[in-house]
Image (cartoon, rainbow, N blue to C red):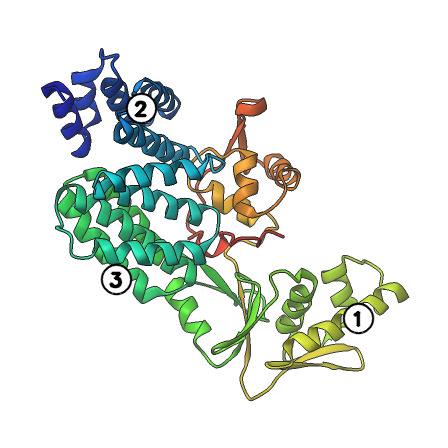
Amino acid sequence: MDATITAAGRALRAGDPLGALQRVALRGDPPGLALRGIAMAQLGELKRARELLRQAARAFGPREAVARARCLTAEAEVALATRDLAWPARALGDAARAFAAHGDRENAAHVRLLLVRRLLLLGRVDEAEGAHAALAAELDGAPATGPAARLATVASLIAFEIALRRGRVEPARAALARARAAAAGSGIAALRAEVEHAARALVLPAARLVARAPGETRTLNLAQVEEVLASLDLIVDGCRHTVRRAHRQVELARRPILFALARVLSEAWPEEATRELLIERVFAGRRANESHRARLRVEIGRLRRELRPLADVQATPGGFALRPRGPEAVRVLAPPIESPDAAVLALLADGEAWSTSSLALALGASQRTVQRALALLEAASQVRALDRGRSQRWIAPPLAGFATTLLLPVAGGFA
């Protein structure tokens, strides 16, 4: 490889895309195209970056497997930045095998980090955590300078996000400290800025503790949320759609009617929730009729069976009341933003432009469901569309003053 290409590559590793472009801006050979594409990606010109990377991948010959794999990896990174989650992940698997066959451990680790980031965007936190743990064990002990420091920073930021999605504050703080140290060793200012931006999630409001008296609801940061969940009280968690006490919990994410009933009953505790209130809040029935009352009895019976390990649902003269199995109180955690489309807003709040197909993949919903949600949000001036047709993308302003961690969907969790 000639000296110009080598110098441009070093500039890119140091986070200096303009310096790289000064050296290869007029190059049309495959290595020059590849470096130009990576530089354009670092400058935010993502569409042009993908074009250049594809040209480079096609131009490399069959004997240049590692060079082609690098182009595929760079294109995959651009696809993630543009939230193109339908980009074929198996191409990254091919790239990882090519790197491993040629002993390129740095790029092999980079590919695996991209795959973990994709899993997180898709809400597949369990899979992401398992894949990340295996990779982190391999990266542990690497020197905290140069390219290894960049990889360590990204790996630590991923660990930070996983801990946030799990609601684990201490592991999140530890991962953040590792990310800061590794970013300092990398010498890349943009990476240090990304770490500091991520750190804000620990101090911003992440949920609300709902009180019976109007005006007494208060916001909680992630550490306070963890403290509430660790208490012995019966917690009706509107962020994860569970009912829990200590280490026991009942998952109701796929039973929205039952969770809605639990939420109304818990907000009325220790008093009863009237049948009229339950029908109005859960079934959207303005006037309760016999059909509504019959359905309410059926759903209350189902809820009673689900909550049996934690609480009872007792019939009262006027309605129903929630009775914990013990002296504990009942507390309600609610998302920082109450909206049926909060998960869509949380995804769009990352500042990137999303297609409806990628939103549907991340939410585990149909494109038509996502399109309806976006239409409502657009009518409320909360999102806006860019372009039309197949190239249409959606963006939203950041959710100022809130951490979106507990709004983000998990796989299959969009209702």
Q: Which residue carries the number 2 mark?
A: 62
- Which residue is most to the bottom? 327
In this picture, residue 402 sits left or right of residue 344 = left
Q: Is residue 385 above or below residue 157?
A: above
Of label 1 and label 3, which has the lower sequence position? 3
Image location (x, y in percent) of residue 231: 45, 78
Q: Give the residue type at disc 3.
A: Ala
The image quadrant that residue 352 belongs to is top left
Of label 2 and label 1, which has the lower sequence position? 2
Q: Give the residue type at disc 2.
A: Pro
| Quadrant into which the N terminus falls | top left
Of 153 and 333, the residue lying toward us: 153
Q: Which residue carries the number 3 mark?
A: 174
Q: Is residue 149 above or below residue 73?
A: below
Q: Which residue carries the number 1 mark?
A: 298
Looking at the rendered structure, the number of numbered marks drawn on it comes to: 3
